[in-house]
Amino acid sequence: MTVLTKRLAAVAALLILAGCGQTGEAEKPAPPTPAEILKKAVPTTAADVFHYAISGGEQSASGVVDSAKKTMTTDFSEKIPDAGFTLTMKFLVVDADSWAKISFGSAPAELGLPKLPKKWMKLDTKKLGADAEKDLIYAGQTDPGFVSTLVEASTGLTEKSPGHFAGTVDLTEATEAEIVEAETLTALGEKAKAVPFEATVDAKGRISTATVRVPAAGKAKAITYRVTYDQYGTAETPAAPTGSAQVDAPKAAYDLLNS
């Protein structure tokens, strides 16, 4: 046997030995973690049109997101107990255009609140402050309830039953969701870092609900922050107002939005 033949034989033997422990079956990928499942379940720009509702936080809100049409609507409602009325604001965003409707309900006349048109007010985004302008231009917003933020700030997530997940969320890492005010966050102390969190997904793996149960702290009562995403593919997207259905927003509207 030549030297070359001996070397080839040795290499072949090593290859045979290396393969002795193989079964021939491809290694199966690890199943996704609960956090990975929930992150994938949050709507993206590729999602169907859907309806959303948010309650229990600093403000209640609802609306529709339609990424295909670059359209988003938001209806806010907030009680102003000291003034004795409820402020409602409706916003419609279509790409770079936006409209608003603002109502002070049955606010007492002595408050001197401005009289605003009841029609859709066409907004000039150049007259809006930086924060308002950011929210009133469609820039791919798909998660108005900040569910992805809550998932990122969560720990100990487990799937309690098919499609139902539970764990805790660190509110100090999820302030963008505006679930509680800064004073309440401070009053919660260490409890703020492990608040009960639950989420559910529908049969197609899309977020249905996300719930945060915040205990009482300081002067703040216990609250349940809840986000609902539903009507996937069936929610109706409002069309942009035209003609007499809209008016130019007056200065008082910009003063309010920029305050």
Image (spheres, rainbow, N blue to C red):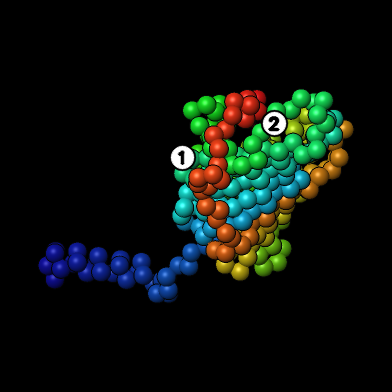
- Tell me if 245 is positioned left or right of 188 in this view: left
At numbered mark 1, what does the secondary structure look like: helix, strand or loop? loop
Kindly identify which residue carries mark 2. 115
Query: In the orientation shown, which residue stands out farthest toward the bottom?
Result: 24
Q: Are marks 2 and 1 in contact (CB under 8 Å)?
A: no
Query: Which label was assigned to residue 96?
Result: 1
Question: Where on the picture, by quarter, is residue 113?
Answer: top right
Could one spot residue 8 in this view of the protein?
yes
Q: 136 and 182: which one is in front?
A: 136
- What quarter of the picture does the C terminus occupy? top right
Residue drawn at point x = 69 percent, y = 48 percent: 54
Q: Position of residue 97 (x, y in %)?
A: 48, 40
Which class describes the residues within 10 Å of circle 1: few (<14), some (14-19), or many (20+)? some
The amino acid at mark 2 is Lys
At numbered mark 2, what does the secondary structure look like: helix, strand or loop? loop
Above or below, comparing residue 80 to residue 40 in the picture: above
- Which one is closest to the eye, mark 2 or mark 1? 2
Q: 171 and 134: which one is in front?
A: 134
Which class describes the residues within 10 Å of circle 2: few (<14), some (14-19), or many (20+)? few
- Tell me if 176 is positioned left or right of 223 in this view: left
